[in-house]
Image (cartoon, rainbow, N blue to C red):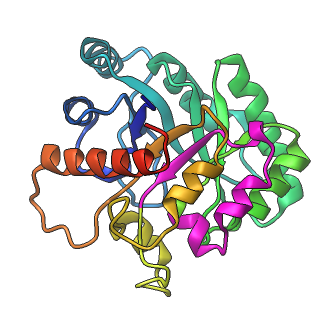
Amino acid sequence: MTPLYLAHQSLIDLEPLAFLETAAAAGFSGVSLRVRAAAKGAPVYEIRPGSEGMRAVRGRAEALGIAVAYVETLALDAGMTRDDYVATLETGAELGAKRLTVAGNDSDFAALSEVFAALSEDAAAFGVVVDLEFMPFRPVKSLEDAIDILRRAGSGCILPDALHLVRSGGTPASLRTLAPDAIGSFQLCDGTLSAPWPDDLPFEARNGRLLPGDGEFPLVAMIEALPKGTMIGVEAPLAGDVRPVDPLGRARRIFQAARGVLEAASRP
């Protein structure tokens, strides 16, 4: 059975220990943890290397049998140095994460690629692979932009997110053009083909997605276009939720919906 991973943004109100417990109870094999703020003022949970909090998170994950598969999100710009990200790599490695998600936050692709290459080299020493997630509201906004960065850097992988792929004009056929080792992981969600908030794509991404299978995205074709063994996560902060919500009930809905898409793609 294909493992499924739950992205922290799906239940970002939950601190890491509660998030781990909820994801495990819902049936997920692993999670991402938000250890860096995705944007200014965005929720984040600092887990310092060697801290009591780190020991608590690691112990709970081990007890539950759930993996911290990747940590997120490092907003990468051309002025970033090793001092700006090494603690994040240390955190990821201590949590047992194998991947780090980054976003490209600089329009100078030549300079950004140099930083990305240096980050990838440093990450490799920690046993971590860097996945570049393109987003249509950031400078690295499309699959083509992400390919350009990887080509220049000569390292790293791409994390296509279903919402960002559609909103940036990508298709399942776009995914098929990539070399098998270029895709590190993939994030499932659903939505309408036309953006409900065309002038506020960040809001949709962080607050207004649909469950896999509840929208119009060609998710089955996307899954079938992925290389075998691609890590599949679900990032689905649901549109229309009224808080407080039942986190476990929501996590179970997300898991069942994602599993249904995988089954439809003959990828149980």
The residue lying at 41 percent from left, 65 percent from top is 190
The residue lying at 49 percent from left, 40 percent from top is 267
| Residue 228, placed above or below residue 169 | above
19 with respect to 105 (left or right): left
Q: Residue 97: percent from the left, percent from the top?
A: 51, 24
Instruction: Pick the quarter of the image with the C terminus.
Output: top left
**Which residues are drawn in magenta?**
163-189
50 with respect to 241 (left or right): right
The residue lying at 57 percent from left, 58 percent from top is 221
Is residue 234 shown to the viewer in this render?
Answer: no
160 with respect to 148 (left or right): left
Q: Residue 51: percent from the left, percent from the top?
A: 36, 17
* Viewer-closest of 118 and 64: 64
Q: Quadrant of residue 58?
A: top left
Is residue 20 shown to the viewer in this render?
Answer: yes
The residue lying at 76 percent from left, 39 percent from top is 180
* Viewer-closest of 248 and 136: 248
Q: Residue 132: percent from the left, percent from the top?
A: 67, 48
Is 175 in the magenta? yes
153 with respect to 144 (left or right): right
Disc tally is 0
Instruction: Pick the quarter of the image with the N terminus.
Output: top left
* Viewer-closest of 44 and 263: 263
Q: Residue 5: percent from the left, percent from the top?
A: 41, 37
